[in-house]
Image: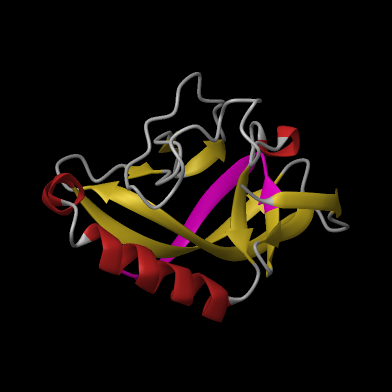
Amino acid sequence: MCDLIKTYSKKTFTGYKIVARKKRTKKLYSIATGIEYPQDGKITVPEKQHRITSHFCDNILESTFAGFREEMVGRTAAFVCFIDAKCMFSIIDRQTKEEEFVRKNYAIELWRICLSSALMQGEYGRDPVVAGRHIKFLKKMRG
């Protein structure tokens, strides 16, 4: 999960997010938690994790997990820099080509998005991110 360090000073943030698009329904999902993202709406708090790829740990929602971050509950994060998002997209896209369930049912995509509501900034690994409680999908960049 992301380490959110401080409140973001602006009301909105435009960044880059990697998602899974279900081929049958065209709906967008979190690849880590499996929640369905609205095209323009509030982030839901998942009761249970339904990760789509094996890239992420299968217990990130459990408060006993070392990677769990209370600040991320009800938020989703986006990369600040396109190059960081593009690198992560390449890794996940390459991995999912080896996962038959993902390959048959989902397309991994990279989107430019706008986040708002209770914005916080921090890092995912070493990459800067901003997280918020409201998401709006703007433009598909890859996938």
- Quadrant of the image containing the C terminus: bottom left
Question: Residue furthest toward the top?
Answer: 47
At x 45% / y 38%, what residue is drawn?
38
- Residue 91: give x, y in percent of width and height: 38, 69
- From the viewer's perspective, is residue 55 above or below residue 39? below
Which segment did they paint magenta? 131-143
- Residue 58: give x, y in percent of width and height: 43, 36
Question: Which of the two residues, 7 or 10, is positioned nearer the viewer here?
Answer: 7
Q: How many marks?
A: 0
Asked if residue 68 can be seen in this view, the reply is: yes
The quarter of the picture where residue 142 lies is: bottom left
User: Is residue 115 highlighted in magenta?
Assistant: no
- From the viewer's perspective, is residue 35 above or below residue 125? above
- Residue 85: give x, y in percent of width and height: 51, 70
At x 68% / y 69%, what residue is drawn?
126
Instruction: Characterize the magenta stretch by its predominant secondary structure.
Output: strand
The quarter of the picture where residue 114 lies is: bottom right
Q: Horizontal placement of 48 versus 20: left or right? A: right
